[in-house]
Amino acid sequence: MFKIMWLRLWRDKGALVLAFILPGFIFAIFAAIFSNASGGSLDLRVSMALTSDAPASIMLAKNIEDKATFTLSTNDDWNAESVRERVRLGQDDVGFIIAGDISQPGLKSIAIIKDPSREVAATVLMGQLRQIMAEGAQVNSPEVFTEVSAMPETQNDNVTDQSVTYYIGATAILFLLFSAMQGAAISLDERKNGISDRLLVGPSGAFAMLTGKFLFLTLIGTIQAAIIVAVGHVAFGVSVMEHLPSLALACMGSAALASAIAVLVASLSGSSAQMNTVSTFIVLLFSAIGGSMVPRFMMPDWLQSLGRFTPNHWSIEAFYGILARGQTAFDLLHVWGILFGLAAVILLLAALISHRMMRV
């Protein structure tokens, strides 16, 4: 039995390679993430506005620009609302406003503008600001800071843990990818039993066959994502009723993209073992760097950039934009374009590959 199983694995070169590459590769990804976060050296994107004309505050702003270890964005024309908007829309991880005279003890001169789902970013920023202030012999008192949420006041104020709104999208796309991969794997049995060959006799061929599977997987995925949203509403008090049309688009778009990717992987796979290994590799990779397992702001900058090419990133942007940032369906047009547009392109690519592989 050992020999049979070894020969089966050895003859399936794709499964063989991925079986031994996957563990080390996933370890390297997580090691890069957690080594970056555990050392307190988060690659934060921070926005700053200086609205005080006090000499000490102006000097502090200059010291921050010179000594900051984070990526700082600032502009002479920015005010409190500018910083708040950048943090709300996710353009920066956290921001701060120097609004008072920093030399006055006990005066809350610096307002930290935070995203509630990124509390650690605000904590790290305050620590780095205290260090810069201490090195510049300026006031170093915890009373100098005040924390303000960048999110609209009406967005889920009754939710105890604001990170719940983030993990609705993060969990939904992770589950949808696994579910769609499992559903698309039936194509390999159809191909093995000759069912796909008979379906290809139809006038539309591979495109009609894959479109039917894609629509079914998308429908099931949309329902599954809606269930996750419903649990967030019932169990955690996330406000969803006033966002139902936008949330329906988010559920459908996430399910469509996950289903299209699953259909493409099934079209490229030559065996069930290869499909299982490839799908596991892809889902874990996308989820690790896309933000489903660890928020992307905790990752090194190069991983954050790679994460934008995953479906997880765009699904999270859709759900979190609606539930936490107060964005409307119109505000998220670019997200819908990527979710639905990329799903259509991938589905067409899968159909072309299936047509070539099965017709030859």
Image: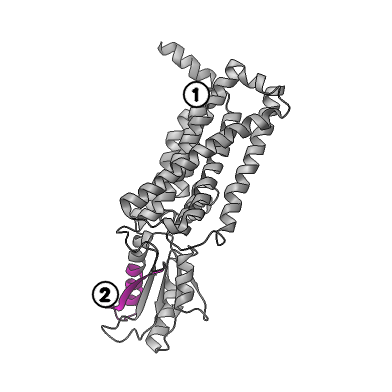
Residue 141 counted in the magenta span? yes
Q: Nearer the viewer, residue 161 or 33?
A: 161
**Percent position of residue 295, x then y:** 41, 53
Q: Is residue 115 visible?
A: yes
Q: Are marks 1 and 2 in contact (CB under 8 Å)?
A: no
> What's under tag 2, amino acid-wise?
Pro
Q: Residue 111 is drawn in which quadrant?
A: bottom left
Closer to viewer: mark 1 or mark 2: 1
**Percent position of residue 45, x then y:** 46, 64
Give the secondary structure at mark 1: helix
Q: Residue 52 is drawn in which quadrant?
A: bottom left
**Percent position of residue 278, x then y:** 51, 32
Structural distance between the alpha carbons of marks 1 and 2:
57 Å
x 53%, y 52%: residue: 308
For disc 2, the marked residue is: 142
**Label 2 packing within 10 angstroms: few (<14), some (14-19), many (20+):** few
**Label 1 packing within 10 angstroms: few (<14), some (14-19), many (20+):** some
Residue 273's disc number: 1
Task: Name the quarter where the C terminus is drawn.
Answer: top right
Residue 14 counted in the magenta span? no
Magenta residue span: 126-150
Q: Is residue 292 visible?
A: no
**Percent position of residue 265, x then y:** 57, 33
